[in-house]
Image: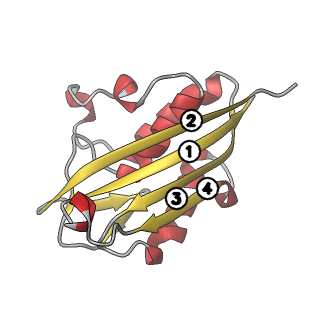
Amino acid sequence: MPEFRIGQGYDVHRLVAGRKLIIGGVEIEHSTGLLGHSDADVLAHAMIDAFLGAAGLGDIGGLFPDTDPAYAGADSMVLMQAAWAEVQAQGWRLINLDSTILAQKPKMKPHIEAMRKRLAEVLGVKPTQIGVKATTTEGLGFVGEEKGIAAQAVALLER
């Protein structure tokens, strides 16, 4: 009988001048980017936490601590691939991975299909197994004030 597990992830990063804005493995033209130890891909980080959590393997900080200089400026797609390999080594396969990006600006809709394709490529799954949605916070809070971007994700695994 198959075993199923659900995991959820959440991440947030501050928007600052002088950084690239990379979300879901896609570089988006914008006047600010996300601040973090790695490339600060908020969507990738939430997704990594979701599937690691579902597999009972902790979180992204456990595998790639932000105190380790080896991960300074790291490409989150490389981190995602390594984390996913750990999950697969435990015999898990991805049923689906769904997510929501919370950003006031820039608009995410023009980039969502590229994100789905890139994330599916990195995980070795079909784009139909990856859900990416986006919303604003109607001008409320740090997202609405354009101080940061957040993302949440949920993963369903089967073994």
The secondary structure type at the circle numbered 2 is: strand
**Residue 36 picture location, percent across and down:** 22, 45
Task: Quarter of the image for the C terminus: give it.
Answer: top right
Q: CA distance from mark 2 to mark 1?
A: 6 Å
Amino acid at circle 3 = Arg
Label 2 belongs to which residue? 7
Label 1 belongs to which residue? 154
In the rendered image of this protein, does residue 21 appear above or below residue 11? below
- Report the mark closest to the observer, 3 or 4: 4
**Residue 154 picture location, percent across and down:** 56, 45
Crowd class of label 2 (few under 14; some 14 to 19; many from 20; radius 10 Å):
many
- Report the mark closest to the observer, 4 or 2: 2
Mark 4–mark 1 contact, CB under 8 Å? no
Which residue is nearer to you in this view: 33 or 4? 4
Label 4 belongs to which residue? 130
Q: Mark number for residue 118? A: 3
Q: CA distance from mark 3 to mark 4?
A: 10 Å
Mark 2–mark 1 contact, CB under 8 Å? yes
